[in-house]
Amino acid sequence: SQELEQSPQSLIVQEGKNLTINCTSSKTLYGLYWYKQKYGEGLIFLMMLQKGGEEKSHEKITAKLDEKKQQSSLHITASQPSHAGIYLCGADSQISNFGNEKLTFGTGTRLTIIP
Amino acid sequence: DAGITQSPRYKITETGRQVTLMCHQTWSHSYMFWYRQDLGHGLRLIYYSAAADITDKGEVPDGYVVSRSKTENFPLTLESATRSQTSVYFCASIQGEDTGELFFGEGSRLTVL
């Protein structure tokens, strides 16, 4: 089965600093999804990457999927308190016509932003 | 209001009792899912459903039962709760076949004493 390892498990960053979260898969990724979870709430979809080398940005968050499609990184520029939360990567391990109905998730990275 | 809602949000029960967690979505999404979130394990898929009357097991289905008689509802039942089922449960649905975007409920925190 697909296994996703996220690093680091937790991260404390001073407001305004940049940071990177990594997601490494044990298998080739056919779809990689990034979600954010605020403490005590459900997950919110951030971005989806499908092609090797693909890069997407939303506001100050950029996600990349490497060429070999086994690793993704999430980069936050000039972090803000609103970026605090738990970031989870999710992945498809097989080609599917129906989106991510069998997503496997990583264990998450807990991000804390300090003033 | 449109969206995906879970109930109850918080539940405390005792070992051996039956518990049902409800999930309701107003979008008529075909796919619905139940995940549990535990420290050190992340999110793990319990059951999912591709449509009404179609359900299938996920990674950790033991001890759980689901049904989907209507597209909008996907209840999760713990037939005889155990302490190991203490967790936060999330229901999710997917809008379409190609969007890749799961919509999650706010979670149901279950404690089994």
Image: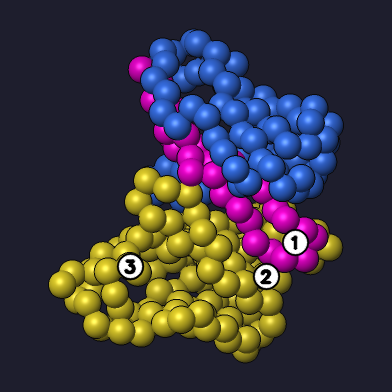
Chain colours: A yellow, B blue
Q: CA distance from mark 2 to mark 3?
A: 26 Å
Q: Quadrant of residue A3?
A: bottom right
Q: Which residue is mark 3?
A: A82
Q: CA distance from mark 2 to mark 1?
A: 9 Å
Chain designation of label 2: A
Q: Which residue is mark 2?
A: A31
Q: Quadrant of residue B23?
A: top right
- Pointer 2 with pointer 3, Cβ within 8 A: no
Q: Which residue is mark 1?
A: A99
- Pointer 2 with pointer 1, Cβ within 8 A: yes
Q: Earlier in the sequence, mark 1 or mark 3?
A: 3
Label 1: which secondary element:
loop
Residue A58: percent from the left, percent from the top? 51, 80
Residue A20: percent from the left, percent from the top? 38, 79
Residue type, mark 3 in image: Ser
Describe residue B28's horizontal placement relative to residue A36 as left or right: right
Same subunit, labels 2 and 1: the answer reads: yes
Residue type, mark 1 in image: Gly
Residue type, mark 2 in image: Gly
- Pointer 1 with pointer 3, Cβ within 8 A: no
Q: Nearer the viewer, residue B41 or A45?
A: A45
Q: Which residues are magenta?
A: B85-113
Chain designation of label 3: A
Same subunit, labels 1 and 3: the answer reads: yes
Residue A64: percent from the left, percent from the top? 54, 83
Q: Is residue A102 magenta?
A: no
Q: Can the viewer see residue A66 in this picture?
A: no
